[in-house]
Each structure stands twice: as C-alpha cells, then as structure tokens.
Image: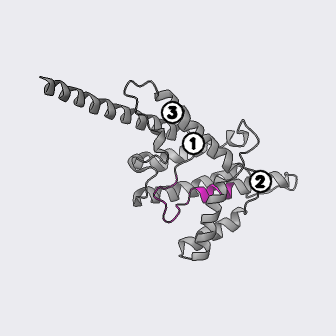
Amino acid sequence: MSFNHPQEQCTDTKGECDSQVFVSWVNTRIVTLKKLGSCDEFPDYKTVSGLLDGMDAGNEEARKKVTDLHASIKDSKEYEDDDLSIWAEVLETLDQHAKAAFQDVQDSIGEMTPDYITQLSTYQQNVVQSLQQIWGLNTRSKTADAEKLKHLDQVVARIAVFLSPVQGDPHAPEPLLGGFFMDYAWNCFSRIKLGIAEVSKAHGDSGHEDGD
C-alpha cells in the first residue's frame, strides 16, 4: 500500500477528519483526470507508443523524452469541461479493468514491486485498447470531427505515459479514479485510523500503569 501524498493520511484518532481526507484524496485524482484530458498539445498515441517501446528496450533518448512527457502532464492545464464529460462513457469500463488487474495485488498498489508493475502493464494495455474502441479512434469516420478525434487520441497518449513507471521514481503509477480505487482508498484510510487508535490506546494503558 502506498500513497503518493503522505500529508493526506489522517492522524485524528477521533475520526473527525475521515471524510475530509477522503474527499481531498478524491479531488486530487479528479484533477489528474482533468490534466489527462487537457487540450494542451501532446504527441499522438502512435508517437508515444514508439517512445514507450524504445524506453522498454533501453533507449536512453526515448527514456528522457518519456520523462519529459510525464512532467508535461503535471504541468497541463485542466480540461475546460468541468463536468468531466469525456470520461462519462468510459469510467465504468476503466473501473472494470482496474478491478481485474489489481484485485489480488491491493497491498502493493502504487509500489514498484514486480507483481504490481506486471499488472499495471496489463491494465495500461487494456485501458488504451478500450478507449480507442469506445472513442472510435481505430475506425475513423470521414464525418467525424477531426479536431475532437485528435484531442481524444492525445488523451489516450497521455494515459499511456501516465501509466508507465518512471525510472528512479520511488512510486509506481496508480490506477485511474473509479469505484474500485475509491473503495481501496477508503479501506486503506480506515486501516490507518484503526492502527492509530490501537497505538494510542496501548500508549494510554501504558501511561496508566506507569502512574500506578
């Protein structure tokens, strides 16, 4: 289990911050979706796929370009459509892919472990293929909006990069936001809260014994 934002972890033994922490966590991942859906310029998926293949083959130039693309995603302007409408028709499918990939490796989500990285690669491939199919990127119609298709292809390219581990990064990419990932996060926060409460109780009991 790994959280890329330790400050999000709750240290309130009374549980008063549980909902606020969870909402903050969700909002952070919503911002990620907005950045992945940005209208900023980005290479098309064919170019990105070639770079990722080159990086996997040990090409240093490709690795540097992928690292730069990772950084550009973080700097992307949030997608102007605040209701996240481009995600509406795909989130359920992406959530199914997340559950299938990570159900049995939940303890290592976000960590650079071999089992998680293997499942992450499968998840990435399934997400890309589903998005291309749902958004009609493989069978482009002559009547389709060329600019819209270009944008959606760039979104797929961003996701492919986002879900690719960066060499030297202590954390691995997380799944995209969905029901499975939200349930996972809530369960993690609950375990953290319970652990803090048990430690506090043990410390309190020890204090009483010392007082005696």
Q: Which image quarter is the C terminus in?
A: top left
Q: Is residue 208 visible?
A: yes
Q: Which mark is residue 177?
A: 1
- Could you say where residue 208 lies in the image, as x and y percent from the top left? 18, 24
Q: Magenta: predominant secondary structure element?
A: loop
Give the extent of the magenta segment: 156-173
Q: Determine which quarter of the picture holds residue 47.
A: bottom right
Residue 112 on the magenta segment: no
Determine the CA span between mark 3 and mark 2. 31 Å
**Identity of the residue drawn at 57% across and 76% down:** 60
Q: Looking at the image, is 66 positioned above or below residue 77? A: below
Closer mark to the observer between disc 3 and disc 2: 3
- In the rendered structure, which amino acid carries the disc numbered 1? Leu
Callout 3 environment at 10 Å: few (<14), some (14 to 19), or many (20+)? some
**Identity of the residue drawn at 50% across and 41% down:** 181
- Could you say where residue 86 lies in the image, as x and y percent from the top left? 72, 43
Q: Determine which quarter of the picture holds residue 93.
A: top right
- Earlier in the chain: of badge 3 and badge 2, it is 3
- Could you say where residue 179 lies in the image, as x and y percent from the top left? 54, 37
- Earlier in the chain: of badge 1 and badge 2, it is 2
Q: Nearer the viewer, residue 13 or 163?
A: 13
Q: Residue furthest front?
A: 211
Per the image, label 3 sits on a secondary structure element best described as: helix
Left or right, residue 86 beside residue 115: right
Q: Determine which quarter of the picture holds residue 177.
A: top right
Q: Which residue is mark 3?
A: 22
- In the rendered structure, which amino acid carries the disc numbered 2? His
Closer mark to the observer between disc 1 and disc 3: 3
Q: Which residue is mark 2?
A: 151
Determine the CA span between mark 1 and mark 2. 20 Å
Determine the CA span between mark 1 and mark 3. 13 Å
Per the image, label 1 sits on a secondary structure element best described as: loop
